[in-house]
Image (tube, helix red, strand yellow):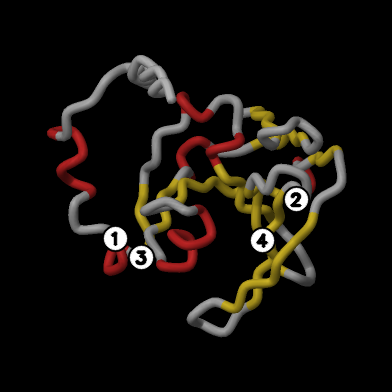
């Protein structure tokens, strides 16, 4: 499947070819912290299919295993884009949050389930609304 995506501000964009049967959720503590969310959804893309436009920055993370991975993001808006090995890069792990076709890419596997938030299985029972609720009406400032 051909996909494309971009950071929030649009200064970095990419395209790649992926296998939709390899979409996964990572529940590791590092992904939770780096994404600011209880898990991260990712998909590998072979490096030869990956095309990137725009300047990026990276942060090198040392995993529990000791391996080092570049965490690549937009230097303007901070959107996490992908990770990769530091040397001999064979693939990038794309962050689905910045992939345009993310609604078509259902995860098929979970990593690091021992670190998963215990309430994730209860999400469907939490009340919600379809969009952001409107702000409450403004209260006039008291006259002085």
Quadrant of the image occupied by residue 79: top right
Nearer the observer, disc 2 or disc 3? Answer: 3
Q: Is residue 126 left or right of residue 58?
A: left
**Residue 48 percent location from the top left of the image:** 79, 46
Closer to the chain start, of discs 3 and 4, is: 4
- Residue on which the image places disc 4: 71
Closer to the chain start, of discs 4 and 2, is: 2
Distance from Cα at disc 2 to Cα at disc 3: 25 Å
**Residue 42 percent location from the top left of the image:** 51, 48
In depth, the one of 141 and 88 nearer the eye is: 141
Q: Residues within 10 Å of mark 1 (few under 14, many from 20)?
A: some
Closer to the chain start, of discs 2 and 3, is: 2
- Residue on which the image places disc 1: 116
- Residue on which the image places disc 2: 47
Distance from Cα at disc 4 to Cα at disc 2: 15 Å
- Residue on which the image places disc 3: 112
Q: Is residue 38 above or below residue 6?
A: below
**Residue 36 percent location from the top left of the image:** 47, 53
Closer to the chain start, of discs 4 and 1, is: 4
Nearer the observer, disc 4 or disc 2? Answer: 4
Distance from Cα at disc 3 to Cα at disc 4: 18 Å
Q: Is residue 65 left or right of residue 15?
A: left
Q: Do the residues under discs 2 and 3 have CB atoms within 8 angstroms?
A: no
């Amino acid at each position: 499947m051909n996909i494309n995506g971009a950071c929030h501000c649009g200064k970095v964009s990419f395209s790649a070819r992926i296998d939709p049967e390899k979409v996964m959720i990572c529940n590791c503590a590092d992904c939770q912290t780096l994404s600011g969310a209880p898990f991260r959804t990712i998909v590998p893309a072979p490096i030869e299919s990956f095309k990137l436009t725009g300047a990026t920055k990276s942060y090198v993370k040392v995993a529990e295993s000791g391996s080092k991975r570049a965490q690549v993001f937009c230097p303007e808006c901070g959107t996490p884009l992908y990770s990769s090995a530091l040397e001999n890069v064979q693939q990038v792990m794309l962050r689905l949050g910045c992939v345009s076709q993310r609604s078509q890419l259902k995860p098929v596997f979970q990593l690091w389930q021992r670190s998963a938030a215990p309430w994730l299985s209860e999400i469907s029972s939490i009340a919600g609304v379809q969009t952001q609720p409107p702000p409450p009406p403004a209260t006039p400032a008291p006259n002085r």
